[in-house]
Image: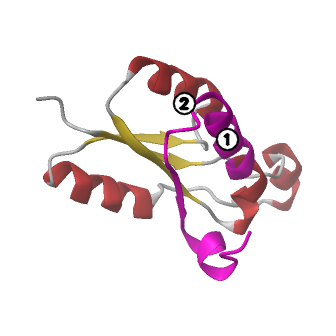
Amino acid sequence: MTAKHIILVNPAPDYDPENYKKFDISMGVGAPLGIILLATVLHNAGFKTTILDGQIKDCKLELDSLIRDSASIEFIGFSVMSSQYNTAAYLSKRVKKVYPELPVVWGGFHPTIFPEA
């Protein structure tokens, strides 16, 4: 029996990182610890998990490829901070347009504070 597949996405931030280099600050840089923890728990429960980190990969291309290649996807989860809202919304709409039956779940700071968004 094939394990159910769950894709967890840390979307790229909405800002242009090149503009922030002049301020010598890192915004949104670091391992997506919440997603890593969730993936570990799900893996230990028998799920196949894939993490897409928009800080290091183009999530659009990776997401399209993963969805196309896997019929066993249970859902796609997004971890969303307010600085990632537009990117997460774009990716979610893109998924639902092509795969309307595939559940998309948001968690994280932004949907917790602004659940109606």
The foreground one among 117 and 26 is 117
Q: Amino acid at mark 1?
A: Leu
- Residue 97: where, in percent of width, then height? 68, 33
Quick one: quadrant of the C terminus?
Answer: bottom right
Asked if residue 41 lies left or right of residue 97, the reply is left
* Region of the chain picked out in magenta, as a range: 88-117
- Residue 37: where, in percent of width, then height? 32, 61
User: Sequence order check: which comes first, mark 1 or mark 2?
Assistant: 2
73 falls in the magenta region: no
Asked if residue 49 lies left or right of residue 53, the reply is left
Q: Amino acid at mark 2?
A: Leu
90 falls in the magenta region: yes
Query: What residue is drawn where x is 62% and y is 48%?
Result: 11
Asked if residue 112 lies left or right of residue 47, the reply is right
Query: Would you place residue 76 above or below residue 33 in this image?
Result: above
Q: Which mark is residue 49?
A: none
Query: What residue is drawn where x is 49% and y is 40%?
Result: 102
Residue holding disc 2? 63
Q: Are marks 1 and 2 in contact (CB under 8 Å)?
A: yes
Query: What residue is drawn where x is 51% and y is 39%?
Result: 101
Quick one: quadrant of the N terminus?
Answer: top left
Spatial separation of the CA atoms under disc 1 and disc 2: 9 Å
* Snapshot quadrant of residue 57: top right
- Residue 2: where, in percent of width, then height? 17, 29
Say whether residue 7 is visible: no
Residue holding disc 1? 91
Mark 1 crowdedness (10 Å alpha carbons): few <14, some 14-19, many ≥20: many
- Residue 79: where, in percent of width, then height? 54, 59
Instruction: Determine whether the residue tagged by mark 1 lies in a helix, strand or loop.
Output: helix
Say whether residue 62 is visible: yes
